[in-house]
Amino acid sequence: MNYIKLLIPFFVTAFITVFTYNSFAMDYCSPKGKKTSITLIIPQSFSVDKKTLLLRTAHDHLKKVIKAGDFINFSIAKKDAIKTVVNECFPGCPPTGFLGQVLGLGTDCNATIMQKDKKIFERKLFLPFPEIYKEGNIVKDGVEDIFASLESIAKFNKTKKYDNIYIISSMNPLKNNISDKEIDSLFLNLVQNDRMPKSLPNATYIGVTQNSKLILFWTDVFKALKLKFKYE
């Protein structure tokens, strides 16, 4: 028996499969995947220490929450705009055998191509970080009014239904360092002058400055809108 002749159809099939997967974009969205929105708020006052901490927090959190097949919307919020960085599904293949992983046989996913697409996705995801880090301590188009920014994000997220919403921010509403006196004064001003935000994103907040007075402030602000301030 000529085994070479028997193997020819296998290699022809494999070649066609690989060629096909290289010719068309893969759809990595999984029916079981979650729809996740992540927004990074860039403040106007942004010292090197705060910048390093917030960007590291953003990087680590993105790595932690994003799973294969999930739809991800990652945006960066500045003073006058919310810029979408990524708005697609995170590449990944379901478990399969060795030949399936290499050649994509018996599955709709080719792991070799998926790995390339994954690198492209991550490159796009983290590309803005070095540019943000290079900016000075004052970011001209950074967020000055965090309440206005949060209201804009709330409107932005209403355009699509998400399973998970995360906002990465120190959540400092002041232009300088947090002080109990200024936080109390700000809250009083919001209440007395009817300046409480009209809407806030019902999200989990990441990178919040660990200050008990600040956390109590946001807990009370969210409570005024019958929401719970969730943070990690």
Image (cartoon, rainbow, N blue to C red):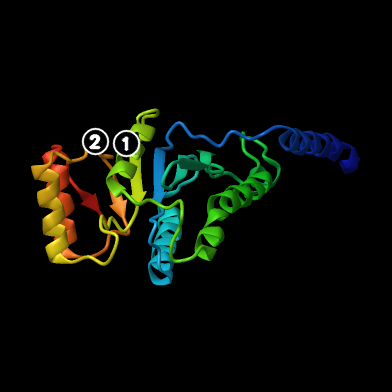
Query: Which residue is at 9% across, 50% downward?
Result: 188
The residue closer to the viewer here, 27 or 184, is: 184
The residue closer to the viewer here, 55 or 214, is: 214
The residue wearing badge 2 is: 199
Please indicate whether residue 214 sits to the left or right of residue 7 in the image. left
- The answer to whether one can see residue 25 in this image is yes
Q: Residues within 10 Å of mark 2 (few under 14, many from 20)?
A: some
Numbered marks: total: 2
Q: Residue 56: percent from the left, percent from the top?
A: 43, 64
Q: Residue 158: percent from the left, percent from the top?
A: 35, 30
- Of label 2 and label 1, which has the lower sequence position? 1
Residue 156 occupies quadrant = top left
Quarter of the image with the C terminus in it:
bottom left
- The answer to whether one can see residue 1 in this image is no
Q: Secondary structure at mark 1?
A: helix
Query: Which residue is at 46% across, 51% downward?
Result: 141
Q: Residues within 10 Å of mark 1 (few under 14, many from 20)?
A: some
Residue 154, numbered label: 1
The answer to the question of whether label 2 and label 1 lie on touching residues, with beta carbons closer than 8 A, is yes
Task: Tell me the distance, in whole angstroms, between the alpha carbons under discs 2 and 1.
Answer: 7 Å
Query: Which residue is at 29% across, 51% downward?
Result: 205
Q: Amino acid at mark 2?
A: Ser
Q: Residue 61: percent from the left, percent from the top?
A: 40, 56
Q: Secondary structure at mark 2?
A: loop
Q: Residue furthest bottom?
A: 49
Quarter of the image with the N terminus in it:
top right
119 vs 108: above or below? below
Residue 210, numbered label: none
Q: Residue furthest front?
A: 193
The residue closer to the viewer here, 71 or 212, is: 212
Q: Amino acid at mark 1?
A: Ala
